[in-house]
Amino acid sequence: MSVAGVEAWSGKDRGDENFPVGSFLIRPDLRRHVHAFYAFARNADDIADHPRLPPEEKLARLDAMEEVLLGRLGDGAAPSAARLRASLAATGVTPRHACDLLHAFRQDATKRRYASWDELYDYCAFSAMPVGRHVLDLHGEGEATYPPSDALCVILQVLNHLQDCAKDLAALDRCYLPADLLGAEGAAVSDLAAPRASPALRRVFDALLVEVALLMPLAARLPGTVRARRLRLETAVIVGLARRLSARLAAGDPLAERVALGKFDIAAAAFGSLRFLP
């Protein structure tokens, strides 16, 4: 690895995500700071998911990103980390959330299986929760908004795992479906290589969607707890989209097709957010 440049951007950008990332709903002066955090996360994620880099190289690159973020290595090694460091200095937001994300990406570089829902949830505490907490801190929201944000972020992460379960196994030999749940339903990781979900694997998907449904009431409280008007709308849209994607995954087969949201879903979620406008 050369410290001249550790990032390995895949070309995926904000427009490729399921949910809005620093959309026009976010206060204009804060939008660039949300985008800086996203670019940092995107580059780190692309390192962790690089199909040809060995684990030790991924870890070294992620460590370099943290060194740049914390000002201990030259900016050229990781430009997105340097931009985020400047953003944090301008806004006063802690680097802790970004460092927590790097913890999750280091885990992705070395861990390919999850034993239980609790183990998966603990992973989400680093891979998903810091994203919401960073945005909340950026808007000056209090820590009372953390629990519903954490719930929403876990929901988004698990839904993404379900969407990409076959791709993750094929490209990275990585499976986030809990092993104890697979075993209880008579399914196996190898079932993800089939063209369609078996009845046993379908039961695993449905069990994870039950966990999502249990988190949804807490997540749905987020827009009502946020003080910033524009952020209320943004979070309300995201809650609406999460509900819709969950329903799509309950009805569809992520092995047989790409289960995703469409323009109508976005419009419907946006319309539903208007009740949080006052």
Image: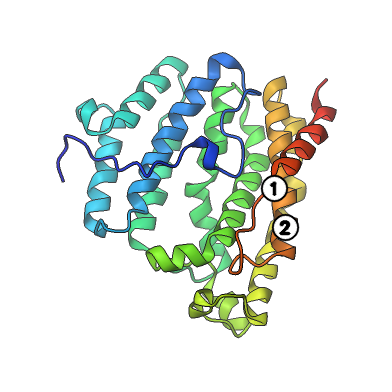
Q: Residue at x 56, y 63 (%)?
A: 118
Q: Residue at x 67, y 26 (%)?
A: 231
Q: Is residue 96 visible?
A: no
Single out the mark in the foreground, 2 or 1.
2
Task: Give residue 101's position: percent from left, percent from top.
Answer: 43, 43
Frontmost residue, 169 versus 239: 169
Q: Is residue 157 left or right of residue 213?
A: left
Which label is found at residue 248? 2
Q: Is residue 39 visible?
A: yes
- Mark 1 falls on what kind of element? helix
Residue 212: quarter of image: bottom right
Q: Which residue is mark 1?
A: 242
Few, some or many residues within 10 Å of mark 2 (<14, 14–19, 20+): some
- The residue furthest bottom is 186
Q: Is residue 94 left or right of residue 196?
A: left
Kind of residue sitting beneath label 2: Arg
268, above or below 247, in the image: above
162, above or below 4, in the image: below
Q: Residue at x 22, y 33 (%)?
A: 77
